Image (tube, rainbow, N blue to C red):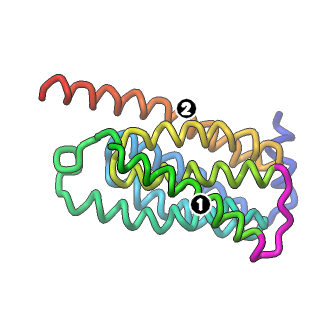
Amino acid sequence: MADFFLNYYRTLPTWQIALEFIAFVLGILSVWFARKENIWVYPTGLVATIITAYLLYIASYIGDMSVNIYFTVMSFYGWYNWAKTGDVKENLPITRTNRKEKLTGVLLFFITIFVVFALYKIFGQQINNDNYIDIFASGLFFTGMWYMAKKKIENWTLWIIGDIIVTPLYAYRGLGMLSLQYLIFTLLAISAYLEWRKILSNKQQLS
C-alpha cells in the first residue's frame, strides 16, 4: 500500500510534490468550509484549483485540467455570490433546485462533456477509455460547482457521484495522493449532504 502512494512520487521533483501536498490540504479544507456554509470555501478552493490545474497540465490530463480551470473561475463567482449577501447563512439560504435550474444543470452537463471532448482534440491528446470516464465526471463537477455557488443542496449529490467515479480513476493512473484526496472528498461530501439536508428540513418545519 505504501508503495502505491510513493512510487509515482519518487521520480518527481520536490517542488512538485510540495505543490500537490498544498493543493491536497487546501482542497480538503475547502470542502470542510463548504459543509459549514463558510465563505472560506472559496479562497482555499481557489488556490487549490489553480495549483491542481497546473499540475494536471504538466501530466497532460486535459479533462481534469479544464475542470480545475472552471473551478477557479466559478470560485470567483461563488465567492462574489456568497459575499454580496452579507450573512451568507441567512441571506443566501440552502435551497433545492427548481425545474428551471434542473434543466439548466442538465444542459450545462452536456455542454461540459462536449467542450472537454473538444479540448482533447484541440490539444491533440489521444482519448483512452479512462479519459471518457474523466469527461463524464467533468460534466458532473461542472454542474455541481454551479449549484454550490447558488447553495443548492443537489450540488452534494453530484460531488458524491463524481468523487466516487474519480477516486479509483486516479488510483488506476497511479496518482495516489489525488486518489486519497477524492476518497476524503467523498466522505466529506456525504457528511455535508446530510448536514445541509438537516438544515433545510429544519427551516421547512419552521416556515
Q: Estimate the spatial distance between the alpha carbons at disc 2 and disc 1, rounded to whole Å.
A: 25 Å
In the image, the segment drawn in magenta is 121-129
**How many discs mark residues in the rendered view?**
2
| Residue at the image position 57 percent from the left and 48 percent from the top | 140
Image point (82%, 37%), residue name: 2
| Residue at (61% x, 41% y) in the render | 163
Looking at the image, residue 125 sits to the left or right of residue 37; the answer is right
Residue 4, quarter of picture: top right
Q: Which mark is residue 187?
A: 2
Q: Mark 1: few, some, or many residues within 10 Å (few <14, many ≥20)?
A: many
Q: Residues within 10 Å of mark 2 (few under 14, many from 20)?
A: few
Check residue 127 for magenta coloring: yes
Quadrant location of the N terminus? top right
Amino acid type, mark 2: Leu
Residue closest to the far top: 205
Q: Position of residue 137 (x, y in %)?
A: 64, 49
Where does the C terminus fall, quadrant-wise? top left
Rendered location of residue 160, percent (x, y): 55, 37
- In which image quadrant can residue 171 be found? top right
Dot label at residue 112: 1
**CB under 8 Å between callouts 2 and 1?**
no
Report the front residue among 52 and 159.
Answer: 159
Going from the N terminus, do you reach mark 2 or mark 1 first? 1
